[in-house]
Amino acid sequence: MSTTSPETAAIKPGGTAPVAPELDVAARARLERAFNVPRARFLLGIPVALAVLAWSFIGAEFNFGKLGQGAINMADFLGRLFPPDFGKFPTIVALLIETLQMAIVGTALGALLSLLVAFGAASNIAPKWLYYPSRWVMNIIRSVPDLVFALMFVSAVGLGPFAGILAMTLGSIGSIGKVYAEAMESVDTGPLAAMRAVGASDRQVVQYGVLPQAAPLLVSYTLLLFEGNVRGATILGLVGAGGIGLELTTAMKMYDYGHLSAIIICIIVLVTAIDQGSALIRRRIT
């Protein structure tokens, strides 16, 4: 068995040994910094973080004792969910299909609008007069709960899935738009600078420099948005914005625990199937 090293094996007959590339000072410092002991300010920040965590526990009235006392009630509630009642299975399937359709349309519209806003919110491609307003718009939208948007659109277009789609679309701009923008900002700036140096327009820089590099992240985040919209659509139905949520609320109010359990099981199956499909697509694109 040959024991030659990879470096030796790579030498062709009559050739010379490969020379390891020299690292510049900045690259060497960055690599060495990864193995340094944390700095003093980091160590001083640990007790500050622990103090903030303790302050939050106290302010939020987090109580392990109360949780233990309520475990009996939780066990009683879970016990009522069994056995599940699938007597209204066709209704559950129809509403789950409606929920899935809402999520698909909401994701498509939300991703498209979020991408447009992200172009203006990426600091490496957008001018400052566009960057800051785009960021402010996303911050404002992200600060408003989706249920508020759903109530607004229900009052505007009436009950049904259309209001839920509009709420998901608008809510997506605040959440996924920010992530799209940060994915574009994280691309390698070398190709962008080279394209600008040879006279490429802003459109060409985005089309040939930014999007090809950011595409895997954009697709991954879009799949994550779709998964979130499927779960979110079940919540939007609580205020009459379509989907399975209204049926879920009705079962809870009527204390129909068997029907409630069947709905929850079907939602779990749907979300799990979507999660597995999304994971498969992510593996293919990465």
Image (cartoon, rainbow, N blue to C red):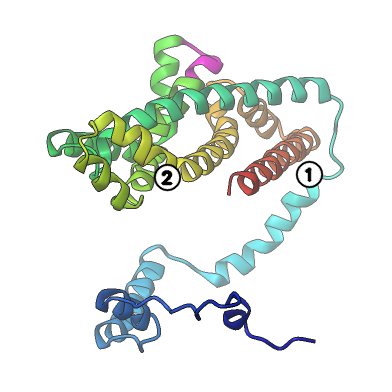
Placement of 26 over or under 188, stated as above or below: below
> In the structure shown, which secondary structural element does the residue marked by tag 2 occupy?
helix
Magenta segment: 158-164
154 sits to left or right of 75: left
**Position of the N terminus by quadrant:** bottom right
| Residue ID for mark 2 | 213
Q: Is residue 118 in sight in this rendering?
A: no
Residue sitting at x 33%, y 75%: 49
Furthest residue toward top:
157
- 249 or 283, which lies in front? 283
* Amino acid of disc 2: Gln
Q: Position of residue 182 (x, y in %)?
A: 34, 47
* Amino acid of disc 1: Leu
- 155 or 167, which lies in front? 167
Q: Position of residue 284 (x, y in %)?
A: 64, 45
Mark 2 residue crowding within 10 angstroms, few (<14) / some (14–19) / many (20+): some
- 271 or 164, which lies in front? 271
Q: Position of residue 13 (x, y in %)?
A: 60, 77
| Residue ID for mark 1 | 81
Furthest residue toward left:
129
